[in-house]
Image (cartoon, helix red, strand yellow):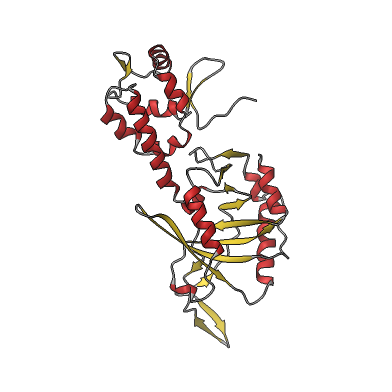
C-alpha cells in the first residue's frame, strides 16, 4: 500500500452521498478498557455537510500545499512518530481489535436524542460511504468551542454568545475504511487508547526477555524497558532476534558490534545504557551501516527492495 491509496479515498468521497456527523465520548479504565458513547447530530440544511466535505477534500487534495502531500510513506504502525508517515493497522491487530469492535458497535447505535451540550465529547466523526463501503473520518478534538467573552452583532447592538458552538475542523486524524485504520496524525492513537495497548505489549515482551536468560540484572532491565519511550518501541519487537540472542556466540558478536557490556557472556544490564541498547536492538532500532560497517540507530526498518 502507498500514500496514493489514502489520497484516492478523499478523491472518491461524494459530497452528495449519505453523510452524517457523530460526536464521540471516549472513556477508559484499567478494568473495562476503552468504551465509547456516540451521538448523531443533525443540521438545518444538507448543504452544511456538502460544503464541509468539499472543503475537506480541497484541503487534502488541491494545490501545491495540499495536506496529503506532506506524507511520503504509508507504513504499518510500528510505534514510531514520524509526522510525514501515515501509519496503518488492520482491525484485527492486538493493539486495537477490542477497542475497534466497541467503537464500530457504538457508532452503529449512536443516540439521536438529548442535548449534546450536556455531555463532554472529545472527538467527532464524519461518517459516510465510499464505493458502498462505510468510511469514517475522525477528528480528535473537542467539537465544541466555548464562546465566553465573544459577542455577535444583532439588531444594532452586540449580544453575548451564551452557548458553545459546534466547530467542524478541516482535518482527519484517523480514517477507518475496509477493515483498516489509517493514522494521519499521532493524535489518532487516543481514539483507541493505544498507550494502554503498547504498555501491555511491553509487559509481555519484557517478561519474555527476562525468561530468556540473556541479561544479568532483571530489576535494572525491567525499570528501563518499561519507562520513557521504551514501551512504545515494543510495538515492533522482533521475537526471532530474541531467539537468536539465546545463543552465546550470537550474543557475544552482537555485544561487540553494538558496544553492549557483558558479564560472563550475558548482557550486563546493570551498566549504564546497556538495557536501553538491548531494547533498541530487539525492537528493530539497531542496524549496521553498509559502507562503514558501524552500528547505527534507526527509527524503523523494512526489507530492502
Residue toward you, 93 or 125? 93
Residue toward you, 119 or 51? 119
At 43% from the left and 22% from the top, the residue drawn is 243
> Along the horizontal axis of the image, is 6 left or right of 209?
right
Rendering coords of residue 64 (x, y %): 70, 48
- Which quarter of the rendered picture does the C terminus lie within? top right
| Position above or below: 235 against 112 | above
Rendering coords of residue 180 (x, y %): 59, 47
Residue toward you, 84 or 78? 78
Residue toward you, 287 or 131? 131
Camera sees residue 62: no
At 58% from the left and 55% from the top, the residue drawn is 172
- Which image quadrant for residue 220? top left
Rendering coords of residue 236 (x, y %): 48, 34
- Which quarter of the rendered picture does the N terminus lie within? top right
> Along the horizontal axis of the image, is 113 left or right of 277?
right
| Position above or below: 46 against 215 | below
Rendering coords of residue 158 (x, y %): 52, 83
Camera sees residue 130: yes
Count of marks, rendered view: 0
> Along the horizontal axis of the image, is 119 left or right of 214?
right
Judged from this view, the residue extending furthest toward the bottom is: 155
At 59% from the left and 52% from the top, the residue drawn is 176
- Which image quadrant for residue 198? top left
| Position above or below: 83 against 214 | below
Judged from this view, the residue extending furthest toward the top is: 249
At 30% from the left and 25% from the top, the residue drawn is 272
Amino acid at each position: 500500500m502507498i500514500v496514493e491509496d489514502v489520497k484516492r479515498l478523499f478523491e472518491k468521497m461524494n459530497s452528495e452521498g449519505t453523510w452524517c456527523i457523530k460526536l464521540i465520548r471516549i472513556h477508559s479504565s484499567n478494568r473495562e478498557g476503552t468504551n465509547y458513547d456516540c451521538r448523531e447530530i443533525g443540521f438545518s440544511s444538507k448543504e452544511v455537510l456538502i460544503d464541509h466535505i468539499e472543503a475537506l477534500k480541497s484541503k487534502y487534495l488541491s494545490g501545491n500545499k495540499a495536506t496529503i502531500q506532506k506524507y511520503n510513506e504509508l507504513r504499518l504502525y510500528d510505534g514510531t512518530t514520524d509526522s510525514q508517515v501515515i501509519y496503518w493497522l488492520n482491525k484485527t491487530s492486538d493493539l486495537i481489535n477490542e477497542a475497534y469492535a466497541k467503537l464500530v458497535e457504538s457508532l452503529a447505535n449512536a443516540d439521536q436524542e438529548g442535548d449534546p451540550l450536556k455531555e463532554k465529547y472529545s472527538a467527532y466523526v464524519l461518517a459516510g460511504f465510499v464505493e458502498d463501503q462505510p468510511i469514517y473520518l475522525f477528528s480528535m478534538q473537542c467539537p465544541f468551542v466555548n464562546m465566553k467573552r465573544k459577542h455577535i452583532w444583532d439588531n444594532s447592538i452586540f449580544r453575548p454568545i451564551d452557548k458553545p458552538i459546534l466547530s467542524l475542523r478541516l482535518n482527519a486524524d484517523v480514517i477507518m475504511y475496509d477493515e483498516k485504520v489509517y493514522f494521519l496524525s499521532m493524535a489518532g492513537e487516543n481514539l483507541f487508547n493505544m498507550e494502554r495497548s503498547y504498555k501491555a505489549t511491553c509487559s509481555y515482551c519484557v517478561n519474555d526477555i527476562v525468561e530468556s536468560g540473556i541479561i544479568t540484572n532483571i530489576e535494572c532491565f525491567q525499570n528501563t524497558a518499561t519507562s520513557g519511550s521504551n514501551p512504545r518501541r515494543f510495538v515492533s519487537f522482533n521475537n526471532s532476534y530474541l531467539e537468536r540472542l539465546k545463543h552465546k556466540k550470537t550474543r557475544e558478536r552482537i555485544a561487540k558490534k553494538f558496544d553492549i557490556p557483558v558479564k560472563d557472556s550475558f548482557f550486563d544490564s546493570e551498566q549504564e545504557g546497556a538495557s536501553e541498547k538491548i531494547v533498541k536492538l530487539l525492537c528493530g532500532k539497531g542496524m549496521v551501516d553498509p559502507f562503514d560497517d558501524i552500528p547505527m540507530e534507526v527509527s524503523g526498518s523494512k526489507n530492502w527492495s
